[in-house]
């Protein structure tokens, strides 16, 4: 099956595209786009990969669902299009960066600049119906994004994994903490950020690790 995805990721993930689950997933997603309002736009489904080629990955951040409000989801987890009001979790991410690194909160919520520096911003589920959180869960996306994590874990070492919340931590349980920097905290959601996301220092810890590996820091 031909999938429009960045070339290096296409090579890594090509076995998945031929599996029955992925064919069924593709049929489901096409039907959903034809009959409902689905986020993100079709061209942005694989944007996390397009913006951050496999060989460029230095940091992995895992989300769960795309945002399901109008104009929010842009294919990068936690990120929104320029001009869109920051969702609460993104506000808290920027607050932690300010506290950790002293950087002011940026004027827009697009995290494309992170992706271009080697941050894979991967949601577990890559599509969602408008106003229906979780509506595309258990349709095959999780199997696909599990394969992404497995490919990274088996083919790349010296990565930083930022795992916020129990869902992300379970999804990346296979990642070796001996071969990578695995950073865990509660989710940045307002419901849990005060339980340990604030003060986690993940952004400075990531940069120190990358610097030690000679990979260059991320301009958060």
Image (spheres, rainbow, N blue to C red):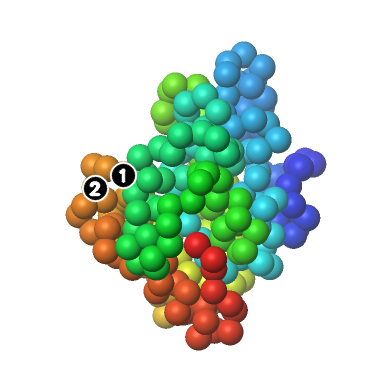
Q: Residue at x 62, y 28 (%)?
A: 29
Closer-to-camera residue (11/39): 39
Closer-to-camera residue (168/1): 168
State the image coordinates of residue 47 (x, y, percent, origin top left): 65, 45
State the image coordinates of residue 15 (x, y, percent, origin top left): 70, 52
* Relative to 206, residue 22 above or below: above
Query: How far apart are the two marked residues, 1 and 2, measured between alpha carbons?
Result: 6 Å
Tell me the element at label 2: loop
Disc 1 to disc 2: CB gap under 8 Å: yes
State the image coordinates of residue 112 (x, y, percent, origin top left): 61, 51
State the image coordinates of residue 203 (x, y, percent, origin top left): 42, 67
Q: Would residue 35 be found to the left or right of residue 163 on screen?
A: right
Q: Residue at x 52, y 78 (%)?
A: 210
Residue sitting at the far left:
195
Residue sitting at the far top:
35
Tell me the element at label 1: loop
Q: Would residue 36 be found to the left or right of residue 53 on screen?
A: left
* Relative to 39, residue 100 above or below: below
Q: Hey, which quadrant is residue 195 in on the image?
A: bottom left
Q: Is residue 205 visible?
A: yes
Point out which mark residue 192 bears.
2
Closer-to-camera residue (39/144): 39
- Judge the density around disc 2: few (<14), some (14-19), many (≥20) Cα neighbours within 10 Å: some
- Judge the density around disc 1: few (<14), some (14-19), many (≥20) Cα neighbours within 10 Å: some
Point out which mark residue 166 bears.
none
Point out which mark residue 189 bears.
1
Q: Hey, which quadrant is residue 120 in on the image?
A: bottom right
């Amino acid at each position: 099956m031909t999938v429009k995805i960045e070339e290096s990721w296409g090579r890594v993930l090509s076995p998945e595209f031929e599996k029955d689950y992925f064919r069924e997933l593709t049929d489901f997603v096409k039907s959903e786009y034809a009959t409902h309002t689905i986020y993100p736009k079709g061209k942005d489904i694989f944007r996390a990969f397009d913006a951050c080629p496999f060989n460029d990955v230095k940091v992995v951040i895992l989300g769960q669902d795309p945002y399901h409000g109008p104009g929010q989801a842009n294919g990068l987890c936690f990120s929104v299009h320029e001009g869109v009001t920051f969702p609460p979790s993104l506000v808290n991410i920027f607050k932690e960066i300010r506290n950790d690194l002293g950087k002011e909160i940026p004027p827009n919520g697009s995290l494309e600049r992170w992706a271009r520096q080697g941050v894979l911003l991967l949601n577990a589920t890559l599509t969602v119906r408008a106003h229906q959180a979780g509506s595309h869960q258990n349709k095959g996306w999780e199997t696909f994004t599990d394969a992404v994590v497995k490919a990274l874990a088996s083919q790349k070492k010296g990565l930083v994994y930022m795992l916020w919340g129990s869902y992300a931590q379970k999804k990346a349980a296979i990642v070796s903490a001996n071969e990578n920097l695995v950073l865990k905290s509660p989710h940045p959601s307002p419901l849990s950020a005060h339980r340990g996301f604030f003060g986690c220092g993940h952004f400075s810890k990531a940069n120190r690790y990358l610097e030690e590996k000679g990979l260059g820091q991320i301009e958060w």
